[in-house]
Each structure stands twice: as structure tokens, then as C-alpha cells.
Image (cartoon, rainbow, N blue to C red):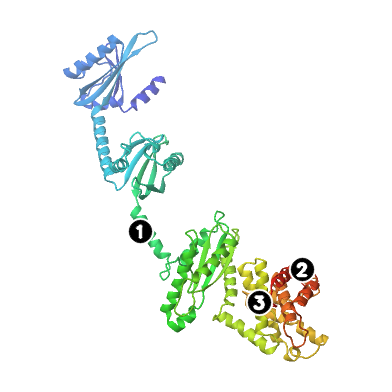
Amino acid sequence: MEYNIFKLLVDNIPQPIWIKDIDLKFVYVNEEYENIHKGVNKKFIGLKDEEIFDGAINNECYRYCNLVISSLKPITEECYLGGIHRKITIIPLINNNGEIEAIAGIYVNLDIINEKDKIIEEQENILKVVMETLPGMVFYKDKDGKYVYVNKEFDEFYNREGIGKSIGKTNFDIHSSEELALKYTKEDNEVIKNKQSICVQTVVNSKNGEKIYTEAVKVPVIDKNNEAVGVVGLILDITEKKEAEEQLKHVSFTDILTGLYNRTYFEEKAKELLSEEYLPVGVIMGDANGLKLVNDTLGHNEGDELLKLIAQVLSDVCNAGQLIFRTGGDEYVILIPNTTDYECENIIKRIFKQCENYKHDLIDVSVSLGASLTDNINKSIYDALKEAEDKVYRQKLLQKNSFNSSVMYSLQAGLQTKSLETEEHTDRVVNYCLIIGERLSLPMSVMDELTIVAKLHDIGKIGISEEILLKEGNLTDEEFEVVKTHTEKGYRIVKASNQLDNIAKGVLTHHERWDGNGYPLKLSREGIPLIARIVSIADAYDSMTNNHLYKKVFNKDDAIEELQRCSGKQFDPDIVRIFTEYLSETQVCV
């Protein structure tokens, strides 16, 4: 059994093997040995070399065998057997008593090995030529991060950087930037750990200060045990490609007329900035004032000039971190990462101020602006933009020569024709409201809302009969109930525009009382919108201090005393205090 296993093993070894006794007679040859001597036509077992081979082979083998028997030590020699260059190893087979019982020999065909070495050398030469002619820098690092091979271009690049030869060095030896060395080392370790290729881009600062954009493909080197033993990399200089991409990107993201970013880029940044690291994000929306007038009177070329002037104003005010877009015909948007309401309002004020430094042939350069914040990822940039747009719409109502303002002024004119409301009364109420708003430090958007409510607070009287509005003497209870409906009628008129929701609520509630006994909703205290509380006091004061056909006229002091008497009952006490302090400070009778 043991012999069969031994024979099975040795017969499957691809090298020729024989065993001879101490008389040098063959006692065993494997199949490969028989194969290389097919032309002998003799059985080997029991025969000596001289009985099988010619004199030259016989003498050479005899000498080697006797040397092993006499020395009891193995030998390895090169020789030519059968015209083939071989390496023969002969070993003594010694028993447990230290006595030699036989010798064994194994042949290796050196011609095959040399041929393989030649092929390997040729392949290495071809590979080297390929590496040297590849368009890029090629390297091989071992798993310890040392450079084992670099091509000519790699060496030339780092020679220019004053590094010298790279072989045997690590990332930290050839890169002056520790940050860069750490980056490369992290990438190499990732490739070795995961046994997967990666493609990475890096910006390298050259010795003369130029930025070089590179793209590297890093591939793991896997041995026969499936272990990663190193990293092969190809680094390409993609600076020109990157610059071309940036130019193309700039063109595709830029509004041709103004040079600002366009709507396409806005869409991209709106998604990118909705991230915790950028919140809160301020959204300022702007709309050019008077563009239609310029287009209709001077032509679209002049209209384009106006748009460019406004773009220049925005660029003058905003810094590099504040992105300016032209998103439509006359619409602009500014996105401001990591900001506050205060900063957004400050930017709007500076834009208004900067507009004064630019002139157009027909009209003043101006823009209506509104701002909003998105301070959590559940509120999109578009949600904030809608809020800002509503504020712009409200501001447009206050701009002269705009279509929106003409609608509002038409409503006011209709009211003045139908009732005793005068333009002067409206202007005074607006002025008082703005004084109170400034003393309360209200933001601009709220001041705009306050102005519009002050202008339109009695607009619902358009829906009430002139017979009641102009009636001399006291109204009946039924007639007074009809007059009280003007708040609801005004609410419905203003509510027709979904951008005036807060204003509609202000119109609806400007006759509510602090003590809850007003109309139409019986609201009280802070439950009444702030805008309505302010308008209520301003309207009451002007009604008391100016000529009215059917009521006694108060002087300033009496009117102040009346406001204070009603403080905490009809009116908000804090607003009464603020307004009466102002009135007391004012020398001229208002």
C-alpha cells in the first residue's frame, strides 16, 4: 500500500526521478524519466547506466553517484543529458542506522527555465516600454507605502519639484504638504483593505504656485494567496480638461445679458444649499421697477440696460459668498448661506442705497425686494422664495408707476369718491403708522404690510351705500351694523390676492379692541394682529385731530389724553405709550 502511494506521488511529479542501489543499479524510475529516454528501448530496473547509455553519459553519472555514496551528502550539478541542459540533484537515502541504502536523482530541464526566464525578461521589457510611453505618471507601491517602481514621467515631475529619485520613499518623503501625503496614504490603504480599484481627483500645488488638477486610478496588486501586496497607480494631469469644464460650466450657468448666474444654476444651488451645514439660508427676491415702462417707451435695448444696471447694483453690494441669480425677465434672487433676518434686511437696505448711485435716461434705477429664511431641511429654498416673492408683491403695491400700485390707488380713489375718506387722511394715517413701526423696530417687510393696511383699512366701505356713509346725524343700530360689515367686505376685497393674506387680516381686524369688545371677531390683546393694533390707534388719532363733518375736533393734547384714557381698553397700552411719547416730543401740532 505504501509503495503504491509512493509510486502514485512520484509518477505525477513532472520532473524525471530515479532511484539506484549502492551498486548503481536502477531500482525505480518514474514515468517522466522513462518519457525522456523513450529511444533507449530497454527496461531500467536492475540495469546499470553503462548497460543502457553511451560512454559519455555513463561516465558523468557514475562520477556524480560515487561522489554522493562516498560523501553521504547531496550534490547539485549542471550537465547536458541527451542533448538537453539539465540541473541534476542526487541525494543519499540513509536508514535509521546511518547506513546508505540507495541514492535518488531528480533532473530539472534548464532549457525550459531559461526559455521562461527569457520570456519573462521580454515581457518585463515590453511592460517597461509601455509604462514609459503611457500618457501619465505610473507607480507601484508596496503595502508599506514605499515606491517600488515609478516610470520616467513620474520621476521627471518630482525631480522638477526637487525631490530626486522616488524609489524607496513614501508619500511623506516626496510631498511637502502633510495633508496631501495623508490623503494619498488613506487612498492607498483603502485600495489594499478593500482590494478594489478607486478613481480620485486631487489638486496639487506645484513649486511655482500653479494649481495642477490630477486624476488617479489606483488598483490593488493581488498575490496568489489573494492578498493585496501593493498598489499600482496611473496619474493623469487633467488641468486643461478641468479648465475647459469650468469654462463650459460658467457658460451654461451664466445669464448672457447680465453676467449673473442663471435659473439653471439657481436650481442646482437650491438643492445643494438645503443642508445643515449651510442653514439658515437667506433668500432675497428682487423685481426690477419700471422695466415695462422703459421697454414700451425707449425699446428693449434700453430695458436691457436697466437690467444690467440693477445687476451691477446687486454685485456691488453682495460679497463672494452671496450668490446672485437672474431667474427671469425682471426677477433676481440672492442666496445667502449661514445668515440671519437682520443680515438679509441690511443687504436690502444697502441695495436701495446703492441704486441711488446709478442713473437711467428715463427712470430711477430701483428694485422691489423681499427676504425670507429657510432654517430647517423641511423648508425648501422654494418655500422661502415664495414668501420673499409675496413680500415683493406687497412692496410693488407701494411703488409709483407700477401696475400693482395703480390697482390699489384706483380702489382708494373709489373709496374717497364714495365716502368722506380723503387722500390727506390716508397719508397722515400711513405716516403715523410708520412712525410707530420704526419705534417698534419692525422689519421692512412688516413696514410694507403696515403701509398697505393703513392705505386700505377702510376699503370695504366701497361696498356700503352712500346713503349710510354720508348720512347726517346719528346712525340707527341697523345702519351701524351695516357699517361694521366694511371690515369683512374689505377682507374679501384684499383676500382676492393670495399674496396679501396678512394685509387682509389687518383690514379685517382693525376695529377689534384690546378688551375684546370690538368687531367682527371679538379678538383681544395680542390675539389682534400687531398691524391692526397700530392702524387702529393712528386712525383714531387722525380722526380726532382733523376736521370732520359730523364730529368734534380735538387738539393734540386732548387727543393724547383720549388715547391714554382708552389705553388698555380699546387700544394696546404699549403702542399708545410709544405713540403718545412721540406726539409729546413733537413741537408742531400734528
Marks 1, 2: nearer the viewer: 2
Give whichever of discs 2 and 3 has the lower sequence position: 3
- Answer with left or right where residue 39 lies relative to residue 280: left
Query: Decide: marks 2, 3 in contact (CB < 8 A)?
Result: no
Query: What residue do we see at 34% from left, 40% from top?
Result: 139
Q: Is residue 196 above or below residue 526?
A: above
As helix, strand or loop, the secondary structure at mark 2 comes to helix
Q: Quadrant of the N terminus?
A: top left
Label 3 environment density (alpha carbons within 10 Å; few <14, some 14–19, many ≥20): many
Q: Position of residue 69 (x, y in %)?
A: 28, 11
From mark 3 to mark 1, how far is it between C-alphas?
56 Å
Label 2 environment density (alpha carbons within 10 Å; few <14, some 14–19, many ≥20): some
Residue wearing tag 3: 430
Give the residue type that dot 2 points to. Answer: Pro
Marks 3, 1: nearer the viewer: 3
Of the pair 557 and 102, the residue shown nearer to us: 557
As helix, strand or loop, the secondary structure at mark 1 comes to helix
Residue wearing tag 1: 244
Residue wearing tag 2: 573
Of the pair 171 and 40, the residue shown nearer to us: 171
Q: Is residue 335 above or below residue 481?
A: above
Q: Position of residue 181 (x, y in %)?
A: 42, 40
Query: What residue do we see at 81% from left, 86% from top?
Result: 478
Instruction: Say which quarter of the image contains residue 91.
Output: top left
Residue extending furthest toward the front: 587
Give the residue type that dot 1 points to. Answer: Ala
